[in-house]
Image: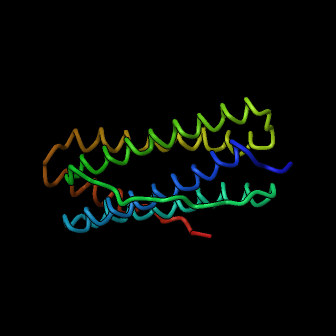
Amino acid sequence: MEIKGKLAEAINDQITMELQATVVYRQLAIEMDVASLPGFAKWFRAQAAEEITHAEKFIDHMVDRGGDPQIGDMAGPDIQDKSVLGCFESALNHERKVSESIRNLYRLAQEEGDIDSMPLLHWFISEQVEEEATVEGICDQVRLVHNDGPGLLRLDAELGSRKAPTVA
């Protein structure tokens, strides 16, 4: 039941990646606040809070299995395109990176025969499919309205209605 070795290291890397996602989403929220788009900013802040919950799931898994969760080094995000579409495309790119990392964790757990990690990793695989689809859908909507002010404001209002998850 104890988790150690390569899988423990990989899960620690994932904890760091999930917390890095929090920083990415928080910076994207700041960019939307600067652009006076409070609905998009609220959506990004809610996503940042959700990423903390994701990190906590991995931390809890490690602790429950006698591991020693560690947060690695993180750098601030470098957001090149601060437009609405650019920010959501940055989010999508980060989600794709997280998805691939989860798939690699799954492969490693299979390789090491660690069946105790499988329920957690199955949950994350499903979650990442949903995350990518959601952000891709928002990108598609932003592309449809392009720089149309009323269209962007409608999307801003719609995404601003999202409820933030509670953080443990």
69 vs 78, left or right, is right
Q: Is residue 167 or residue 158 the one in the foreground?
A: 167
Residue 158 x %, y %: 34, 57
Residue 59 x %, y %: 67, 59
Question: Residue at horizontal 79%, vertical 38%?
Answer: 114
10 vs 139, left or right, is right
Q: How many marks?
A: 0
Q: Is residue 56 above or below residue 151?
A: below
Q: Is residue 139 above or below residue 70?
A: above
Residue 6 in view in this figure: yes
Q: Residue furthest right?
A: 1
Question: Residue at horizontal 66%, vertical 35%?
Answer: 106
Residue 11 x %, y %: 64, 49
161 vs 16, left or right, is left
Q: Residue furthest front?
A: 5
Question: Residue at horizontal 21%, vertical 54%?
Answer: 82
* Quarter residue 142 falls in: top left
* Quarter residue 140 falls in: top left
* Quarter residue 97 falls in: top left
Q: Quadrant of the C terminus?
A: bottom right
Q: Is residue 1 or residue 82 the one in the foreground?
A: 1
